[in-house]
Every structure is written in C-alpha cells, then in structure tokens.
Image (spheres, helix red, strand yellow):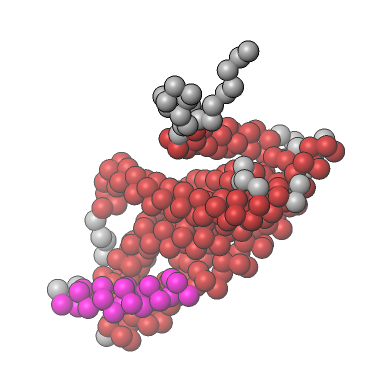
Amino acid sequence: MAAEAQPLGTASPKGRRTPRVITESKTYERLQSAGDMGALAVSTVKLAAKPPFSWARDAVVEISTMTQRCLIPLLVSHGVYLIGYGIILFGAILSNIGVIERESGAIFIIWVREIATWVTGMVFAGIIGSAITADIGARKIREELDALDVLGVRKVDTLVVPRVIATTIAMPLLVMVSLVWVTVLNFLIAPLTLDFSSGVFLHNLRANIIPTDLLLTALLKNLILGFFVGVVACHKGLTCKSGAEGVGRAVNQTVVITFFGIWFFNSLFNLGYVTVFSDTAQLRG
C-alpha cells in the first residue's frame, strides 16, 4: 500500500520533516505575481490596439469618474503643500539669500518634475487603485467573473482594458490640473506674502517653462505611471482570494505596490532626465 501523503512542513512517520515545496515560498509568489502583471500589461496593450475599440465608451466614463473622485483631495493636498512648503518655508529661504524673485520659476520646476507626480500619484493610487481592486475583487467573490467565463465573455476585454486606458489618461490629466492650480494659487499668494511684484513673478515663470518638462516629466512619465497603477489594480482584483478578507488584502497590496512603484520610477526617471538634458539643471531668469 502506498504511504499516505504528509502535509507540507509536518513530521513524517520516522520523525523527519518533509521539505516545503518552493511554490509556497513568498519569494516565488511575488515573482509569479510580477510575471502575471507583465503578461496582463502586454495583453491589455494588444487588445486596446485592436479594432473596433469597444473599450472607448467605458474608458470615457471611467476617466470622468476618476477625475471627480480625485479632484477635491488633489486640490486640497497640493494647495496645503504649496502654502506650507513652497511659500512659507521655501520662500523664506529664498528671501534670506536674496533671490526671492526666482520663487515662481523654482516652484514651477519643483512641481512639474517632482511634487506634481508623487502627490498626485499618492492620491490617485490610494483612491483609484484601491477602488478598482475592490470593485473587481467584489465581482470575483460574487462569482460574477465565473459567470462571464460561462458566457464566453473575456474578462480582460470588458473589465481590464477600459480601466487601464482610463488610468493611463486620467493620471497625466490630473497632473496638468495640479500644475495649473499650483501656479494660479502661487500667483495669488506669493507676491503679496513675499513682497515682490506680479510682473517679476510672471517674467521668471515664463523663463522657466521648458517644453521638455511638460512633454516628458509631466506627460510621458505620468502616462507610464497611470498605466502601471491600472495594471496592478486590475491584476490584484482578478487574483484576490475568496471572502472579504481576501479583497481587503488585495486592496492593501495594490496600495503598497503602487506607492513604492511610483516613488521608485519617479526617482529613476528624474535622474535620467536631468542626466540626458543637462541644461535643464539650471534655473533661468
């Protein structure tokens, strides 16, 4: 008679512990999850580029919903950060060293290259990323995804592609909104608070608006990050474990992965950008 299989990690009849299979290790699970995310990203791009583009209508609805959900938290967070850091703290430093007229250009460069991305990214990943994961995860535990399989409807086509396209477009859109909001708010507050003219503000601002900043650090970088947030959120929703606890864990994993990914990619992108375009490292005006 064949010996009965022993549970992994338990003692055998002779007192020896059976080896734990490698597929149970956390490292393997993480690598497998990363590989699955890459495969989902490739599938999403292929399906999105394939006519007749049935995802377009749902993507527009998703973009509208995402923008409405993020707009107020985005404006509040950027406004508070601008007043506390940009005007009160950074403005005082510039005033002490006698270059207060450079405040508008410096704030614009700081925001367009760094702060606009990671503040918007934190708001976007925390609100939108978690919402997408929770929505798809709830559909899974209600067995809606199994019903789609039975009906022959592809989950990636109907659930993933519109959401990923929406996040890819919504994130740079919100970054542009944050740049406009910060610039207008800075124009209304900084000249009066720091005692320099609005004409000096506008002159220095115009001198430091660089096309490569807008096209690469504000647009391209955030297109990539929006795509990343969408893929991670959809993957975690599709692969979450059963029950409310499984959905909660998937949401938590989405937030952690996207936060770390945004910080990491933002740092690498900015380093490469300043290295390639070395002339952008100096303040003009």
**Magenta stretch: includes residue 82:** yes
Q: Quadrant of residue 187?
A: bottom left
Q: Residue at x 24, y 56 (%)?
A: 282
Instruction: Quadrant for the C terminus, please.
Output: bottom left
Q: Residue at x 41, y 50 (%)?
A: 260
Q: Is residue 177 left or right of residue 1?
A: left
Magenta stretch, overall SS: helix
Q: Residue at x 14, y 73 (%)?
A: 97
Q: Height in image: 227 above or below 44? A: below
Q: Quadrant of residue 68?
A: bottom right
The answer to whether residue 110 of the structure is visible from this angle is: yes
Give the magenta range. Answer: 76-96
As rendered, which of 3 and 31 lies closer to the eye?
3
From the top left corner, tell me how far across and down residue 215 is, in percent.
45, 50
From the top left corner, tell me how far across and down residue 81 is, in percent.
38, 72
As rendered, which of 158 and 177 lies closer to the eye?
158
Q: Residue furthest left?
A: 97
Q: Height in image: 37 above or below 106? A: above
